[in-house]
Amino acid sequence: MVNLRSGGPYIWATWLPRLLSGESSCEWAGWFKARHDGGSWVKRPSDFDQTQWLLNHTALLNEQRREWEGRGYEVFTEGQNSFNLRGKTAVLAGKPDLVARRGDEVVVIDAKTGKPGPAHAIQVAIYQYALPRALKRYRGLTLAGQVAYQDHQVEVPVQTVDKAFVQNVGQLITRLAAEIPARQVPSLDECRYCEITSADCPVRVEGSSVEEGVTEDF
């Protein structure tokens, strides 16, 4: 039986970037996970190679940590950066890979081993927004950001977290936390990597190929 979360909607920062960037359109999946206890519903098996990803990600993360420490920064890693930011409608949670600090200069760094995409910078921007509001040691500070890939880095300037960005993030979280279910957009692209099964999402699209038609017009 699928149970509601006892403490109210709980949203991981990593669920938001693809929706904000337009790379994903199905807000219902985030709504379902935000409002329901993760231990009460069966997740779809994944063919993702978790072991190889962990090896690559950890190697890149350690490389970045050493680099920032070499510049004289104190570097906080993963669990040290965990935060819960409680709003009126939900709790936003996250765990940035690295946060480097030297005096009042703070940089949020997220290590990515896959193909670069706009959602990565948005994820860092969410951390730039949330950390000063959630953790006392960053209260009142403005955080810079960076996405670290294996062969290059992408800067996320502080100006990214402007009034419009904060408004967009807040509106999305409000929709995912609402009692009324968010919008479903079932399609091969949306459902292919979604961990919610048809037992909880009856409109889920299964299969591996796009439907085809035939014409003599060309």
Image (spheres, grey):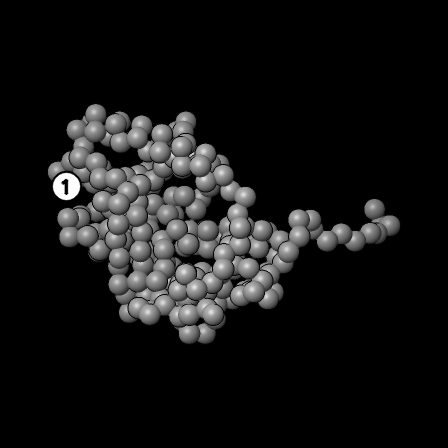
Seen at 54% across and 44% down, the residue is: 47
Q: Is residue 177 visible?
A: no
Residue occupied by mark 1: 104
Is residue 106 found left or right of 166 in the rendered image?
Answer: left
Q: Where is residue 105 shown, x and y percent of the image? A: 18, 39
Residue farthest to the left? Answer: 103
Question: From this viewpoint, which residue is outermost toward the bottom?
Answer: 179
Image position of 184 (left or right of 14):
right
Rendering coords of residue 30 (x, y %): 45, 60
Q: What is the x, y in percent for residue 189?
A: 59, 51
Residue under the image location 79 percent in, 53 percent down: 213
Figure check: 92 above or below 141: below
Question: Outermost residue toward the top?
Answer: 70
Q: Residue at x 64, y 56 (%)?
A: 206
Q: Is residue 157 above or below residue 186?
A: above
| Most foreground residue, 168 or 180 | 180
Q: Secondary structure at mark 1?
A: loop
Looking at the image, which residue sits at the far right?
216
Residue nearest the observer in this picture, 202 or 74? 202
Percent x, y for residue 12? 36, 55
**Figure check: 117 above or below 200:** above
Residue under the point 66% across and 49% down: 208
Amino acid type for the residue under numbered disc 1: Asp
Within-10-Å neighbours for mark 1: few <14, some 14–19, many 20+: few
Horizontal relation, residue 68 to residue 26: left or right:
left
